[in-house]
Image (tube, rainbow, N blue to C red):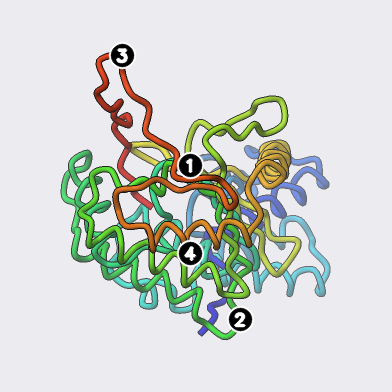
Amino acid sequence: MPLSASPVVRRVRLGAELRRLRHRESLTLEQVCTRLGWASTSKLSRIELGQSRPDLADVLDLLDVYEVPPDRRTELIVIARDAATGRGWSKTLGEMGERQRAYAELEAGAARIVEYQPAVVPGLLQTPAYARLRLTAGALFSDGVDVEGDLRGRALRQEVLRRPDPPDYTVLLDERVCDAAGVPADVWREQLRQLTVLAEQPHVTVRLLARDAAPRGGVHPLTAFSYYAFPDPADPRTVLVETLTTDLRLVTDADIARYERLIDWLLAAARPAEQTREMLAGRLGAGPGLPLRAVGTAGPVPRPRAPDGAEVLDRPRAPHEA
């Protein structure tokens, strides 16, 4: 079942609203904290930046200081409750690790998701066997990773695509994702079959970026990223940028505008969804050893070879944590 608005998103929105109210009253952090008897400004700063779960009593005190009128006050109290309690999110999201939980909270509350992946199949589309490979690889870079717990968490995340009101999910994949290097043939074939089936769903769009695709100005994303928009247009659109050790959460208007332009350029350069589905289906029938080919080409594209005739191997892939 759909959950309430993501507490992560609500914290960011609440913080921005409280910051605007403070500026409207021409108050500094120090002045507000002095009025409330708070020991330092760090508490208020973290609330305004959306970095901590707010205490509802503290929010009520802030609304008193800012003399917020009743209607506006009621609206902000609803947002504060979402940000503070999560309305069952912890129980629903289960035992998944911290990084995966950040994705789960955004996915479950989103109306639209756009994901770019240059190296691996995204978590929402992974089979259990493929996910286990990815999570096991990721555990090499982190201590104390619970692969089994994260595997169950990944399956729970995927329920978002099967709920009655799923988000509009668009996936942009570099064609290298569909190379089976390092993945056992049976695992890859099962994964490719699932990718092909999910690409047929009305709310899921999968589009491949050809190896020689040239987005506008030759701009290519250097890392995987995910973009989220929410049913309430006042909730901040969010981008998570994936790195080896952590994920960067971006919410400023300037950052989001840049990624929205990038998404438009990638969509303009990607193969159409119908052609992508035909290529995936054709690849599934061709067997695990052959690369994808575009519809209408004479045959599979050969792997590049070194002067001595040996195949040039793909570069090692970074593990996919999310």
- Which secondary structure, mark 2? loop
Of residues 197 and 236, the one drawn nearer to the viewer in this rendering: 197
The amino acid type, in three-letter code, at marker 3 is Pro
Looking at the image, is mark 1 or mark 2 earlier in the sequence?
A: 2
Q: Residues within 10 Å of mark 3 (few under 14, many from 20)?
A: few
The residue pinned by badge 1 equals 224
| In the image, farthest residue toward the front | 298
First-in-chain label (4 vs 2): 4
**Mark identifier at residue 307:** 3
Which residue shows up at 54% across the image and 80% down it?
2
Q: Count all numbered tags in the image, as a single digit.
A: 4
Foreground label between 3 and 4: 3
- Tell me if residue 124 can be seen: yes
The structure residue drawn at horizontal position 35% and vertical position 47%, both measured from the top left corner, is 290
Q: Which residue is mark 2?
A: 165
Three-letter amino acid code at the position of disc 4:
Glu
Q: Is residue 210 above or below residue 125?
A: above
Query: Where is mark 4, residue-wise?
Result: 105
Of badges 3 and 2, the one in the foreground is: 3
As helix, strand or loop, the secondary structure at mark 3 comes to loop
Q: Could you tell which of marks 3 and 1 lies nearer the N-terminus?
A: 1
Give how far across and how far down residue 311 sits, in percent: 28, 27
